[in-house]
Image (cartoon, helix red, strand yellow):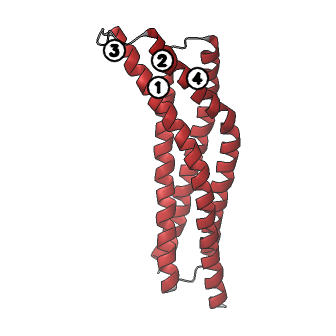
Amino acid sequence: MEDYNSKLFLEQLENGKNAYKNLASTYGQMVIQINNLNTRVRKQMNNISEIEEGLDSNLEENSIQQVAQSILEELDTFNSSINENLELFKKCISESLNFYTTSLQYYKQEKSELSALIKARKTVLFLEALMRKFKNKVIGVQTGLNVLPAFTEQMRHSYKAFEKNAIKLIVELKNAEGECLEAAKLMESKIQVK
């Protein structure tokens, strides 16, 4: 019976690891979009600042319009794909954490299981740190967009749509953080029982 439980334990951890890999792909796509937005927003803020302070006389209005257009394109890309990515993200995080916590039902405190559980716990804590870092980056982009002027009605509409989507994303990331911490605590309690 113990060999069977040990096998089930390791299978659940492996399933959790595979779900984590699926999550990493979805997460990676969203991070790339936010990083691109963050870069363009910061560039636009620098351009506007240099013009206002008279530091760059070569900077033309055309340059600001080009950066504004690239921000608009990134916002539209993000806004059009966020709902699908968010659903996939929620599914993957739920699957991954479910496999990890289900594995605890089969944990019998054997030495090989202990090292696998410690490794899985580290993965869950790493995942929590990624969620927190990403959430802070989304908040940074959101703040930057609040400061930037919207040059057109289309930009105002895209800013508002991003704001709404960013709030949904931040809520999901915050929920994922909490779920990761809860799973890590459950794992920790099993590790400490020995």
Image quadrant where residue 106 sits: bottom right
- What residue did someone put label 1 on? 41
Q: What is the spatial separation of the Cα atoms under label 3 and label 2, in whole angstroms?
A: 14 Å
State whether residue 191 is above or below residue 50. below
Decide if residue 103 is in sight here.
Answer: yes
Distance of label 1 from label 2 (alpha carbons):
8 Å
Is there a contact, CB below 8 Å, between mark 3 and mark 2?
Answer: no
101 sits to left or right of 131 = right
Element marked by disc 4: helix
Mark 1 touches mark 2? (CB < 8 Å): yes
In front of the other: 52 or 141: 52
The spot of residue 95 in percent (x, y) is 67, 60
Q: Label 4 belongs to which residue?
A: 72
Give the class, few, some or many, for how many residues have Cα within 10 Å of label 2's Cα (few <14, many ≥20): some
x then y, percent, for residue 92: 65, 55
Name the secondary structure under disc 2: loop
Which residue occupies 50% across, 53% down?
Answer: 128
The amino acid type, in three-letter code, at marker 3 is Glu
Which residue: 57% across, 48% down?
Answer: 27
Label of residue 148 in the image? 2
125 sits left or right of 3 in the view:
left
* Circle 1: residue type: Val
Give the number of callouts: 4
Helix, strand or loop status at disc 3: helix
